[in-house]
């Protein structure tokens, strides 16, 4: 039974470098990958583990955990006191236990950094669109205020927010204003054409009147000559 238990314990690996062990009631090693049955936990490594043994022995519970340091590594010793007085040990390295959490923490930090970068880029692009739209609106308004605005200019609607709605409304206003001014120009051109036709008609009327006056004058002269000859 002891050999079977020893073989089973020796095959168990805790995380990457952790292992199992078995001690008797006096602290002598029964199974351990690094020590022999001649070694005692109270004396190995210059007694570095004696305080750990004392914590196990003084613990009234059959099952427990003890934190300790061995050869520069922080470790945890889980123990279980068997009914025959033997002590079954499990000794993983602390850093290996929390290694998945460290990886998750690193991944979380990377994701946060990526999120911040993406948010900054998206914020910059959005702000650039907003500033561009505002500058275009300001430019068009300035041209209209100076009285020399180009009514064929239109604002690029880059967003679908309040700025985009304002730009779209201003474009509609410019469309209506441009159409109104075009209609006024058409009416003005028609008035100019009518005025020219009226001027031409007046000139013709004046010419006809002068011609009629000439005929009347000639008739008067003829009448006067006839009268003189009759006398």
Image (cartoon, rainbow, N blue to C red):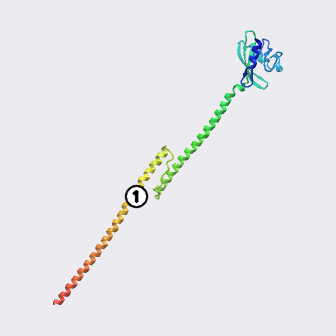
Quarter occupied by the N terminus:
top right
Q: Residue furthest top?
A: 84
Q: Is residue 190 left or right of residue 167?
A: left
- Residue at figure coordinates x 38%, y 60% from the top left: 186
Q: Is residue 126 above or below residue 18?
A: below
Quadrant location of the C terminus in the rendered image: bottom left
User: Based on the displayed image, in which of its 4 quarters is residue 214 positioned?
Assistant: bottom left
State the image coordinates of residue 124 (x, y, percent, origin top left). 58, 44
Name the spot of residue 110 as percent of width and height, x first: 65, 35
Answer left or right for 6 relative to 174. right
Tag 1, which secondary structure? helix
User: Residue 68's x, y, as percent?
Assistant: 75, 21
Q: Residues within 10 Å of mark 1 (few under 14, many from 20)?
A: few
Disc count in the image?
1
Q: Which residue is mark 1?
A: 182
The residue closer to the viewer here, 219 or 91, is 91
- At which x and y percent is residue 75? 74, 23
Write the residue at 35% across / 63% down: 190
Q: Is residue 110 above or below residue 44?
A: below
Q: Looking at the image, which residue is at 46% across and 45% down?
A: 165
Closer to the camera in the image, 102 or 88:
88
**Which residue is painted at 31% across and 68% down in the image?**
198
Look at the picture and state if 3 lies above or below 117.
above
């Amino acid at each position: 039974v002891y050999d079977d238990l020893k073989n089973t314990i020796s095959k168990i690996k805790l995380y990457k470098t952790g292992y199992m062990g078995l001690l008797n009631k006096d602290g002598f090693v029964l199974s351990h990958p690094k020590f022999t049955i001649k070694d005692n936990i109270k004396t190995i490594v210059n007694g570095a583990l004696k305080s750990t043994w004392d914590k196990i022995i003084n613990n009234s519970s059959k099952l427990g955990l003890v934190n300790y340091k061995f050869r520069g590594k922080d470790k945890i010793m889980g123990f279980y006191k068997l009914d025959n007085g033997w002590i079954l040990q499990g000794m993983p390295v602390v850093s290996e236990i929390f290694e998945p959490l460290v990886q998750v923490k690193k991944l979380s930090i990377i994701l946060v950094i990526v999120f911040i970068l993406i948010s900054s880029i998206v914020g910059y692009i959005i702000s650039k669109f907003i500033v561009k739209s505002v500058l275009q609106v300001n430019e068009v308004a300035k041209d209209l205020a100076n009285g020399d605005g180009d009514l064929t200019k239109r604002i690029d609607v880059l967003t679908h927010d309040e700025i985009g709605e304002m730009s779209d409304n201003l474009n509609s206003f410019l469309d209506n204003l441009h159409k109104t001014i075009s209609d006024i120009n058409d009416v003005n051109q028609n008035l100019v054409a009518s005025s020219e036709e009226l001027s031409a008609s007046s000139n013709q009327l004046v010419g006809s009147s002068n011609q009629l006056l000439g005929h009347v004058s000639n008739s008067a002269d003829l009448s006067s000559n006839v009268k003189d000859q009759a006398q």
